[in-house]
Image (cartoon, rainbow, N blue to C red):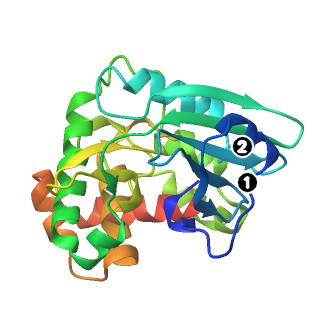
Amino acid sequence: MPSWLAGPPADEVAPPPAVRRLAAGDAVRPVWENQLGGLTFALGAPPTRYVKWLPRGVDPVLTDLAAEAERLRWAAPHTPVPAVLDVGGDDVATWLVTAAMPGTSAVDPRWVADPAPAVRAIGAGLRALHDALPVEACPFDWSPEHRLEHLQPRFEHLRAQLAEPPPVDHLVVCHGDACAPNTLVGADGRWVGHVDLGSLGVADRWADLAVASMSLGWNFGPGREDDLYEAYGIEPDPARITYHRLLWDAT
């Protein structure tokens, strides 16, 4: 589920029965919701683990928590990501339980009030992720060809255009949803990990960079993209940025 379609719950949320069972008596606090009806809960005070809960009957491409668990387990030996504790489901929903990690989201109120360190952390963290994950060993695909299999009907008129991506600049294992909320930032302003890797896969690094930089405007306001590129260690590439943002919107 793309992070730009999600945020802290606007209203009071009652934990579903499955989440209460998983909490095993610990405190339960809703921390995130998306437009598909998915919810994330923190368990424990302070949190020791998190539960993603998704109702059945929504787009399985966007809500395959078993696929996310598989990607987390694959990435964990190489880079800081949440440890998978449980994956399950019932007639109502599916869920993924992960261990809590250090740091806070890059869009925590602290960093929204002082965005500069968070923006640099997003860029540096993305570069570290791309450098750490082994492309040759990655079994997951996030190429334009793969993603166009899930082109949204309202963008069908763009299929021919999107089927001709720019030449690959540098092939990496992409995060797949590199929006600002998915970088965790420590108290010192440095990145400490990544979350929400359900779309992780091999692609041009600009597939992540274009979306990460675009998301800064949604979360921090305009004028900060160059700081992200500098922290990553790259000059902006307008053609690749334009293509990969369009592909993001369309798929």
Amino acid bearing label 2: Val
Q: Position of residue 72 (x, y in %)?
A: 46, 29
**Disc 2 from disc 1: Cα separation:** 6 Å
The local secondary structure at tag 1 comes to: loop
Residue 235 in view? no
Which kind of residue does numbered mark 1 sit on? Pro
Q: Secondary structure at mark 2?
A: helix
At x 45%, y 28%, the residue is 83
Q: Position of 157 compared to 231: left or right?
A: right
Mark 2 packing: few (<14 Cα in 10 Å), some, or many (20+)?
Answer: many
Res. 175 visible in picture: yes
Q: Residue farthest to the right? A: 91
Above or below residue 157? Residue 91 is above
Residue farthest to the front, as pictured: 25
Q: Nearer the viewer, residue 113 or 124?
A: 113
Q: Quadrant of residue 115?
A: bottom left
- CB under 8 Å between callouts 2 and 1? yes
What residue is pinned by disc 2? 19
Residue sitting at 10 percent across and 60 percent down?
230
Q: Which residue is mark 1?
A: 15
Quadrant of the image containing the C terminus: bottom right
| Residue closest to the eye, 122 or 174 | 122
Residue 84 horizontal/vertical position (percent) = 51, 27
Above/below status of 122 relative to 197 = below
